[in-house]
Image (cartoon, grey):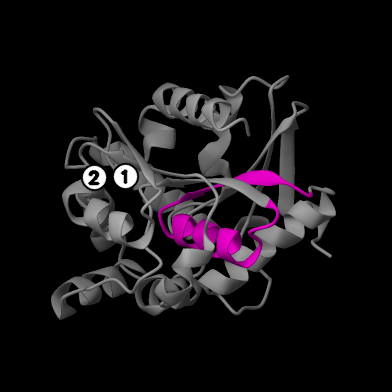
Amino acid sequence: MMDEHRYQTSGHGPRRLLLIHGWFWDQRVFAALIALLPPDEFTCATFDIAGYGTARAEEGPYDMAAMAEDGWRVAQALGWNDFAVLGHSMGGKAAQKLAIDHADAVRAVIAVTPVSVAPLPFPPEVRAFFERSCGDDDVAGALVGESVGGRLSQAWLDDIVARTRETADDDTRRAYLRSFADDDFSPEAPRLTAPLLVVFGEHDHGVAESVMRPVYEGLYPHARFATIAGVGHYPMLEAPEALAATIAAFLSEMSC
């Protein structure tokens, strides 16, 4: 069973939404977004992945399959037999894996600036840059800055980096990096049959729509797409109102 201290719920509505956080920060990254989802319409659940936040002492494996299974354990602990799942960045890869493995329960997937289920074609110098960000705050800040299109203040970048350092160890993050970059679930992609919305940020230079949309179109012919204007890789922090409206509209249309 999933320890209760690792997950939180909000709201009491009929739309059940499980949210999986990404590489930077922890489940608290979704707080502003959840506050904008009407509590009489949504019941939201968030959790800290192993090695992060309230689960910092949890041993691995620190990988996408374990993230997906932890999400499933949260749903089971809550007694959810059907629900939608939202994942951000590497959490988007885990959300896809969860929907692949539990297709009978996942009614919709929202992948926000997501990593693909296929391996990332990192050039060696880019891979090395990501690796260095795990132990060097200046490199981490530069990485986050690039992912938001160089638009946000240094104070904003420093805050994200500090919150991440507070919540997870460097080696844990390195392990997740190897998994989200290298793990290949693409042969299983046809098993994801639930409605899928892929959300891009206009200024996201990390998960650029021009690069990633063709990947998702090839993996999931039924996928739908939305682009949030004026944001980069973190729409739940940069424009939570726009992301909340996008989520609500999609789930309403899908009757989820």
Q: Please state if 207 lies on the left or on the right of 168 as rendered.
A: left
Q: Please state if 19 lies on the left or on the right of 164 as rendered.
A: right
Image point (61%, 72%), residue name: 66
Q: Position of residue 44 (x, y in %)?
A: 67, 37
Q: Nearer the viewer, residue 120 or 57?
A: 120
Q: Is residue 241 above or below residue 59?
A: above
Q: Is residue 130 above or below residue 194?
A: below
Image point (15%, 76%), residue name: 123
Q: Position of residue 53 (x, y in %)?
A: 61, 56
The segment highlighted magenta reads 81-105
The reply to whether the magenta stretch includes residue 230 is no
**Which badge, 2 or 1, comes first in the chain's sequence?**
2
Q: Position of residue 120 (x, y in %)?
A: 28, 71
Image point (53%, 27%), residue name: 253
Amino acid of disc 1: His
- SS at badge 1: loop
Q: Position of residue 10 (x, y in %)?
A: 72, 32
Q: Does residue 207 appear in the picture of this structure? A: no
- Please give the residue where the numbered disc 2 appears in the rendered image: 204
The reply to whether the magenta stretch includes residue 82 is yes
How many other residues sit within 10 Å of disc 1, few (<14), some (14-19) or many (≥20)?
many
Q: Does residue 11 appear in the picture of this structure? A: yes
Tell me the tag on residue 233: 1
Q: Nearer the viewer, residue 190 or 83?
A: 190
Q: Are marks 2 and 1 in contact (CB under 8 Å)?
A: yes
Whole-angstrom CA distance, mark 2 to mark 1, is 5 Å
Q: Please state if 18 lies on the left or on the right of 91 as rendered.
A: right
- Say which quadrant the C terminus sits in: top right
